Amino acid sequence: MDEEFYTRKDSLRLRGFDYSSHRVYFVTTVVRERRHVFYNRKLAEGVIDCLVNLRKKMKFNVYGYCLMPDHFHGLIGIGDAETKLGRICGAFKSLTTKVYWGHGEGDLWQRGYHDHIVRNEEDFFECLKYIKQNPLDKGLKDWKFVGRIDYLPR
């Protein structure tokens, strides 16, 4: 079987799509059992630090992020053909789980992640708006774990 185009039967990935292509993705990953672990400020700060450090190491862009009490949204831009979305998400979940072990025990994240391939500029700004609005929609007025690190080039 051609490994490059193999996808698990229950996978949400698009069969045959090159997830290392120069694109922007809207990614969501959810805490196991939807526990509200990120009300712990130190844990949430540690997770954001992991995101910032991983971004530098793996050379991807973060156009927006939101760490909600029970899930994470990121607007991730990949520009390096060596960097694949799955590797970024796997590394993020692995590093943040190790941070979590300093505050709790067991698994932090559910298996997998959901991705949306951003198709155009309008789609990009809709995703960014969703990320920024998510805490407000959930009644978290002063939620600190929302932001952006990178901006689109002009």
Image: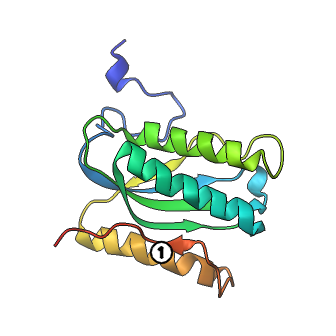
x, y (%) of residue 142? 65, 86
Q: Position of residue 139 (x, y in %)?
A: 69, 84
Instruction: Give the total of numbered labels.
Output: 1
Task: Name the residue located 73 percent from the left edge and 64 percent from the top edge.
Answer: 42
Residue at figure coordinates x 56%, y 58% from the top left: 49
Judge whether 119 appears above or below 127 on screen: above
Examine the rendered structure and indicate whether residue 93 appears above or below residue 9. below
Q: Secondary structure at mark 1?
A: helix
Image quadrant occupied by the N terminus: top left
Whether residue 149 sits left or right of residue 18 in the image: it is: right
- What residue is shown with label 1? 130
Visible in this render: residue 63? yes
122 vs 98, nearest the viewer: 98
What amino acid does circle 1 point to? Tyr
Q: Which of these two is toward me, 59 or 89? A: 59
Outermost residue toward the bottom?
141
Q: Residue at x 64, y 53 (%)?
A: 30
Q: Residue 102 location in percent, x, y?
A: 78, 48
